[in-house]
Image (cartoon, helix red, strand yellow):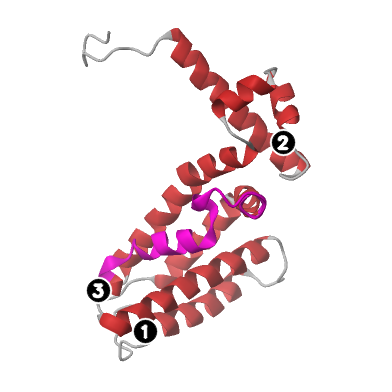
Amino acid sequence: MDQETGSRKPSKRVEQKERTRRNLRAAALDLFAVKGYGPTTVDDITTAVGASRATFYLHYDGKARIVAEVYEDVVLTETFEYYRRLDALLAQANGDLRAWLDDALGFFERHRDLLKFADEAAAADSDHAELQTAQVLDRCAACMPTYLGRWSGTERELARLRLELLILQLSHFALLWVDGHWHVKRELALDVLLDLWSGALRAGAGGSAPFD
């Protein structure tokens, strides 16, 4: 027992179990990056860490579960924080939407591989709701109650639709841009995104939304 906190320390068995889980997760992500999500098998993952298939299934019900876990822990945690920041930003008199969009592009640059794995896992296994686009869009919109609170009734539903379309557009655009589909410099890409987001976020608000 920890004398300072009064809490019990985890047993060696629990620590070993958690270490094995972390090793399986790390090995899977490394293999997905090298071989691709689809070609990587459970046997590949277990071989990489010297574990058995039985051990793998003690921790995960399949490789999609690993992606879903990391997606929830890393990608969605950061994503929701971004949209909470945007909600606060749009309440400011001179919110810098361009800087927020620039940060968002950086997010896609950092998590490029994991976002690809998530798309593949979602297509291959529909059981993981956290990877499904519809649920992610709803959860992002839920992070912006102040912005959506400007409207009521049908107008609020329309504002939510515009917002979710913007989020969807940004996600697809950013992944393609990061992959080099458009050979457009970052500053020009931000010019276009800012134009689209500024207009759509102001729509239905009489052009009075407090940001540039």
Q: Amino acid at mark 1?
A: Arg
Give the residue type that dot 3 points to. Answer: Gly
Residue in the foreground of this view, choosing between 98 and 131:
131
Amino acid type for the residue under numbered disc 2 = Leu
Q: Position of residue 91 (x, y in %)?
A: 26, 71
Q: Which portion, as a residue range, is magenta?
A: 120-146
Residue 103 shown in magenta: no
Marks 3 and 1, the one that precedes in the sequence: 3
Q: Earlier in the sequence, mark 1 or mark 2?
A: 2
Residue at 44%, 66% (x, y): give it.
99
In the image, is 29 to the left or to the right of 105? right
Please give the residue where the numbered disc 1 appears in the rendered image.
202
Q: Secondary structure at mark 2?
A: helix
Secondary structure beneath label 1:
helix
N-term-proximal mark, 2 vs 3 = 2
Dots 3, 1 in contact, CB < 8 A:
no
Quarter of the figure with residue 161: bottom left
Residue beneath disc 2: 31
Label 3 crowding class (10 Å Cα cut-off): few <14, some 14-19, many 20+?
few
